Amino acid sequence: MISISQLQFAYSDGPFSLQIPHLVVEDRESVVIAGPSGSGKTTLLNLIAGILPAASGSLKIDSTDITSLSDAERRLFRLRHLGLVFQDFQLLEYLDVLDNVLLPCRIHPQVMLTRDLRERAKSLLDAVGLEGFARRPIGRLSQGERQRVALCRALLLSPRVVLADEPTGNLDPGNSVRMVELLMSESQRAGAILMMVTHDHSLLPRFNRVIPFELFLKRSPVAAPGGTEE
Ligand code: ADP
Ligand code: MG
């Protein structure tokens, strides 16, 4: 469960601030965060991921209040319990596809790289249509292929919470649906929460709930010309 109460955050160098009085997402729930560009969707995911520290309030994942953890503790918690698909993928160019997917267990001191995990990595790559890509360098992948590698990495350790920031932004409609179905089935299997940002309205009916982001804004952002696209 994610439980947020009286959470406040502001960037040190800019006017943007966010305040969330109350938000609860239950295990097995799949939710979409919807809102225009610049409304703070990525900021919220980074707060839940413990990448950005809140100014005040509480943000619990299960029984852990991540606002009370040190930077190092938040990092370990994130590596072990959260699966993140970043908007810009954040893959390591000097590693190949398989080693990028296996990265969470290479950098977490308490997670061993087992044969089972290696097999899981390969079966996730198969599930996203990247069979045969294991040893390919990241530099030789298309944007859509990189996005799918990022998704496999996020799911590797069956996280408690999957945070996906526009994970289908570079994919064709067929692959988008396939990725969302994989995110959903993996989250359900692990009893996890899926929180996703998307502008693709055709995907919304697949989710339990849509959280309209404007609810949380202290001040309205200047709308991007032409609508809600990034
Ligand atoms: P969204 O994901 O909804 O498009 P973001 O969470 O990325 O929005 O950004 C919300 C607001 O915070 C924007 O106005 C953006 O310019 C600002 N912002 C994002 N990152 C930073 C930062 N590191 N420092 C200062 N302001 C930032
Ligand atoms: Mg964003």
Image (spheres, grey):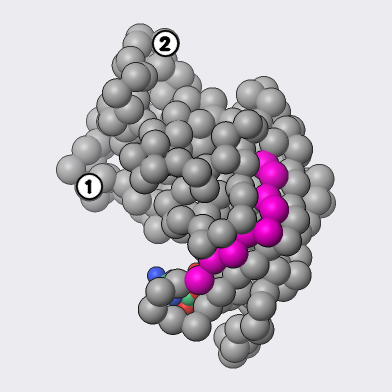
Q: Quadrant of residue 220?
A: bottom right
* 3D distance between C-alphas at marks 2 and 1: 25 Å
Q: Which mark is residue 126?
A: none
The CB of the residue at mark 1 lies under 8 Å from ligand 2: no
Query: Callout 1: helix, strand or loop?
Result: loop
Above or below for 109 versus 148: above
Q: Residue drawn at (69%, 36%), measured in percent from left and top?
A: 1
Q: Residue drawn at (22%, 38%), measured in percent from left and top?
A: 95
Task: State yes or no: residue 33 in magenta.
Answer: no
| Residue type, label 1 | Glu
Residue underneath mark 1: 93
| Residue 197 on image: x %, y % | 62, 57
Residue underneath mark 2: 116
| Residue 35 on image: x %, y % | 68, 70
Q: Which residues are magenta?
A: 2-10
Above or below for 132 versus 223: above
| Residue type, label 2 | Asp
Residue 130 in view: no
Horizontal side, residue 45 vs residue 79: left or right: right
Marks 1 and 2: in contact by CB < 8 Å?
no
